[in-house]
Image (cartoon, grey):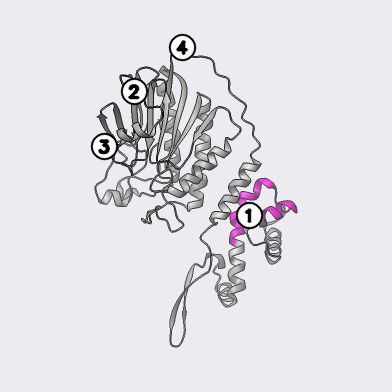
Amino acid sequence: MKSNQIIKERSFDIYDSGITRPTDIARRLVDEGYIDNESVRNFRRTISNWVKSKYVSDTNPGLALECDAVGIPLDSVKHGWYKGKHWSIAFKADVNEGPSFEDMLKDHMDDVKNHAFKYEKIKREPLDRPHLLVIDPADVHIGKLASAFETGEDYNNQIAVQRVREGVDGIIQKAQAFDIEKIIFVAGNDILHIDTPKRTTTSGTPQDTDGMWYDNFLIAKKLYIEVIDRLMQVADVHFMYNPSNHDYVHGFFLADAISNWYRDCENITFDVSIAHRKYYAYGKNLICTTHGDGAKWNDLTKLMASESDAWEGGQSKQRRYVYTHHVHHKIVKDDIGVTIESLRSPSGTDAWHHRNGYQHAPKAVEGFIHDKLHGQVARLSHLF
């Protein structure tokens, strides 16, 4: 691989030829032997900064000269002031905040195309007393920032990832007393904290954040792949995605990315539609998962009866459960024929929730064991 200066100069030449997207420039550099294929992702952000710098230099040569004179990196300039004789004018550099949706989509498509690892089918032996394990890391909020100085505890991307890893491993260890035939992995449910480059939720509520939106997306993607690979060593997995209010758009993209990643794997199935309530039948169990920010609890039983083809009426001994999220703390309600349960979250308390007294505790990743005939026979909690 050539030196950074040579790569930078060649990147500018490619940009001048009309190829302006950082991803396309990186691919051209690979084709020409300037960087190797494994370095594309690492160089992409560097190339993006180079392109921003060149764009600003070409369109605002006066700004480029002034920055060069005083030693300010041109690609770090986001806004400034022009002070004239009669006016003082604020201006903002015409630079995008990170990659566009199109860039992210192309990166994902490239990842999937280049993902050559073949998942060989894992053959399972029949179990004497098979059970279903539900693992549900609820409301992880990758990208949330909390400072112990204000809220009494720290929370950031590193802590979020570590808690999911530790929580999933903890649930697996606690479930060893049961023969696990199948695992439901519940995904979504505010896995990401923000949904826009302006650091807001889908509806526009500002958030305290750790990291850029595109970094958080990639962190969550890597975490899900790591967790699923771990779970498939235990049993076949069913991936159930719940759309949620913090990341309604990016959460859907993430779930679709994961389903495509495992497109050739026979040990995992997916339910990643945008439907707000998902259903799964296991023996005499009927299980629903939903984020919890939409339909009222009083309506969930009726919705289950009308929406699920697996609902058994009459005098059946069907065991029915709804697992909800969103509120970050434990609530359990026995409705007529249905148990509704909200799950704890492993995420820390940010400034807004602390200020308003919403202190959910304890923080945990939770799981549930279901017997084919008797329904939910165990609750498992990994506490932090």
Disc 2/disc 1 C-alpha distance (Å): 51 Å
Disc 1 marks a residue whose amino acid type is: Thr
Q: Is residue 64 above or below residue 188?
A: below
Disc 3/disc 1 C-alpha distance (Å): 49 Å
Viewer-nearest of labels 1 and 4?
4
Disc 2 marks a residue whose amino acid type is: Arg
Viewer-nearest of labels 4 and 2?
2
Residue 6 image point, x, y percent = 71, 60
Residue linked to disc 1:
23
Residue linked to disc 2:
319
Residue plotted at (45% across, 29% down): 184
Contact? badges 3 and 2 (CB < 8 Å):
no
Disc 4 marks a residue whose amino acid type is: Asp
Q: Residue furthest left?
A: 357
Contact? badges 1 and 4 (CB < 8 Å):
no
Span of residues in magenta: 26-49
Q: Label 4, secondary structure: give it.
A: loop
Q: Earlier in the sequence, mark 2 or mark 1?
A: 1
Disc 3: CA contacts within 10 A as few (<14), some (14-19) or many (>=20)? few
Disc 1: CA contacts within 10 A as few (<14), some (14-19) or many (>=20)? many
Q: Earlier in the sequence, mark 3 or mark 1?
A: 1
Disc 2: CA contacts within 10 A as few (<14), some (14-19) or many (>=20)? many
- On residue 298, the disc is 3
Judging depth in this view, the residue of 110 and 223 nearest the camera is: 110
The quadrant the C terminus occupies is: top left
Determine if the magenta segment contains residue 92.
no
Residue linked to disc 4:
128
Viewer-nearest of labels 3 and 1?
3
Q: Label 3, secondary structure: give it.
A: helix
Residue 370 image point, x, y percent = 38, 22
Q: Is residue 296 above or below residue 383?
A: below
Residue plotted at (38% across, 20% down): 284
